[in-house]
Image (spheres, rainbow, N blue to C red):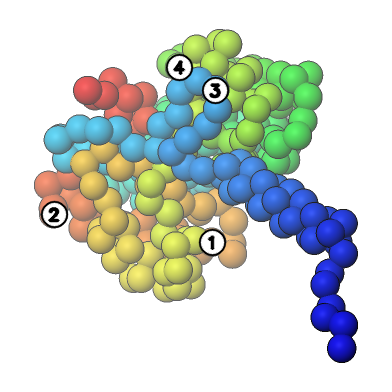
Amino acid sequence: MRKFRPRRWLVWTLVIILVVSGSLWGTWELTSARSFQFYGGLTDRVDTTEKVVALTFDDGPTERTPEVLAALAAAKVRATFFVTGRELAAHPGQGEAIVRAGHELGNHSYSHERMVLVGEDFVRSEVERTDALIRAAGHTGPIHFRPPNGKKLITLPRYLAARQRQTIMWDVEPESDGTDAADPAAISRSVLDKTRPGSIVLLHVMYPVRQPSLAAVPGLISGLIERGYRFVTVSELLALRR
């Protein structure tokens, strides 16, 4: 009986499909890498021996901003708010309230669209329109940028690098690390377990669906303070870089 031998072209086709699929998967994984990008500076935490931590909030501002500010005021800590231009334009007074309370505003794009496979004109518009609104809210310090969904590849990092700006990521995100995001106590425990000196903590607290995250803020703040941590803004954290 004649043995079956797959045609050589079929074998090579399968090899090419596997190689291309692997490359595409690897590239997609790189777009959300927290500690690597092809251009410019990226910070997911700062290497320091000081027990400092930057608490950051993404999205907004929204009508829930006063609740967030009240929680921070009660704990007497400062945070960095990475806001979107679209929501800042819709709630300018809330952006101004964040600045008046002594917190830092960061840029989280205008429309919150993933900034992968986009042109430089799109990146420029997303960044610069939001920068202008942040300045209008009264923020006078450096404006750091955090990509929507943490996604970046070529154009965005290159644009930021050309303007000596950093990509700010994070190393602690309890809402997506397997923690029960509906349980405030679980969120707090996750932050306490994973925070190290120089960590950047990411939370989303601006929408009703994220009420558990907002409810977790007092507990995680008090827990970290009990462990000797001091809260700083992203700018203050970057200044401690070795």
Along the line of sight, which residue is nearer the eye, 116 or 51?
116
Give the labeled residue for mark 3. 39
Q: Which residue is mark 1?
A: 210
- The amino acid at mark 3 is Tyr
Q: Is residue 232 depicted above or below 221 in this figure?
A: above
Q: Quadrant of the C terminus?
A: top left
Q: Which mark is residue 226?
A: 2
Of the residues under marks 3 and 4, which one precedes in the sequence? 3
Residue 72: image quadrant is top left
N-terminal-most mark, 1 or 4: 4
Task: Note whether residue 134 is visible.
Answer: no
Q: 2 or 178, which is in the foreground?
A: 2
Q: Nearer the viewer, residue 67 or 193?
A: 193
Which quadrant would residue 223 be assigned to in this image?
A: bottom left
Residue 146, disc: none
Q: Nearer the viewer, mark 3 or mark 4?
A: 3
For residue 216, what is the image quadrant? bottom left
User: SS of the residue at dot 4?
Assistant: loop
Q: Which of marks 2 and 4 precedes in the sequence? A: 4
Q: Earlier in the sequence, mark 2 or mark 1?
A: 1
Check disc 4 and report the residue beneath it.
142
